[in-house]
Image (spheres, grey):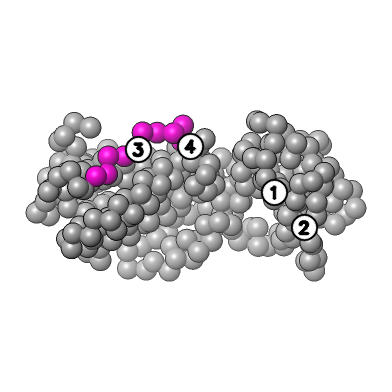
Amino acid sequence: MNPSARLRREIADRVAQSLLASGEAREVWLEGALACGFAHAASDIDLRGIVDGTLPVWESRIVDGVRVDLQATAPQRAEELRHLFRSFDVRRDDLSSFRRVRASMHDLMCLRTALSYGSGRWNPVLAPEERQGYRRWAVADQAEVAASLAEDLTGLVEDGLAESVGVVCRKLETCLAALDCAAAGHPVLGDKWLPLLTGAPPRPSINPARAETWEWFRPVQRRVARALLGCWPVDDPLQKPPSLGAPDAGWLPQRYADGWFLRRGDVHIPITGGQLLGWLSAVSTDGA
C-alpha cells in the first residue's frame, strides 16, 4: 500500500468511527480501489453507510485535504445485490437477468470490494462463494463486451477501414485485460488499475494489418475461452466442432446457464463442452 493509500485508509477509519458512534449508520463500508489497497495522490474515498429507515442525504466532505464521498443504502438494497451473486440464470432465449445484472455491474463491483468497519479493522462483506458469484458475472460481462467489439471488427475489416480497426483493437486489448482480471478473481475496478491487478500481462497480438486471414484473432479467442472455462470447467472428451468455414473469423465462445455457444454477431450456434474443446484446439494450431 503506497503512502496515498495509507493516508486515505486512516481518514476512512476516522470517518467510519464517527458515523458508527453517532448512530448515523449501522454499518460503514469502504469500497472501490482503496478497499483493494490502491489509491493515487488525487483519489477520493468511497464510503457507504448501511442505514435503517429513511435514508439521509449526505454531502461529500473534505478531511485533511481529501474528498470523502458518502452514500447511504438500505439493507434491503444491499441484500438484493448480494442475491445476484448466488445464481447465474442467464438463458439464451431469456437474457433479461443478464441485462439487469450488466446494468448493475458498477454496484456489484462496489459490493465485491466492500469492507465493513468494526473493532478497528476492515473486514470483507462478502463470503467466498459470493465473491465467486461476482467472478462469474464479471467474466460473462467482459466476454459480452469482447463479442460486441469482435462484431465491429468483422464489419470494419470487411470494409477495409484500417484506422477504425485500430481503435477497436485497442479497446479490445483493454477488454481482454479486464477479462483476465475477472477470471483471476479480482474485481474489475477500472482501466487505470488493470496493470496492478493483472501484473501487466503482455499485450495481445491484435494486428489485422499483418495478415489477410483471421489468424491474428486467435489469441483473442483463446483468452476468452480460457477465462470462461476457468469459471465453467469442461471435462468432456474432445469432439469435432461444427463447421464454421474459417473457425477464427470473428467467432467467440459464450457460456449461459443453458450451455455453450459459439457467437459471431447475431449468430449463436449451440455446442457441447467437447465441441468447445475441439474448436479451441482448432484455433490453437499456431502453438501460442
Q: CA distance from mark 1 to mark 3?
A: 30 Å
Q: Tell me which numbered mark, 4 or 1, is placed earlier along the sequence.
A: 1
Q: Which mark is residue 44?
A: 1
- Residue 186 is situated, as x and y percent measured from the top left of the image, at 51, 40
Q: Magenta part of the protein: which range? A: 198-207
Quadrant location of residue 43?
top right
Q: Amino acid at mark 1?
A: Asp
- Determine the secondary structure under disc 2: loop
Dot 1: few (<14), some (14–19), or many (≥20) neighbours within 10 Å?
some
- Determine the secondary structure under disc 1: loop
The majority secondary structure of the magenta stretch comes to loop
Q: Which residue is mark 2?
A: 60
Q: Amino acid at mark 2?
A: Ser
- Residue 158 is situated, as x and y percent measured from the top left of the image, at 17, 60
Q: Identify which residue, 204 or 32, lies in the foreground.
A: 204
Q: Is residue 226 above or below residue 99?
A: above
**Furthest residue in direction front, as rendered:** 163
Q: Identify which residue, 83 or 197, lies in the foreground.
A: 197
Magenta highlight on residue 113? no
Whether label 2 touches label 1, CB < 8 Å: yes
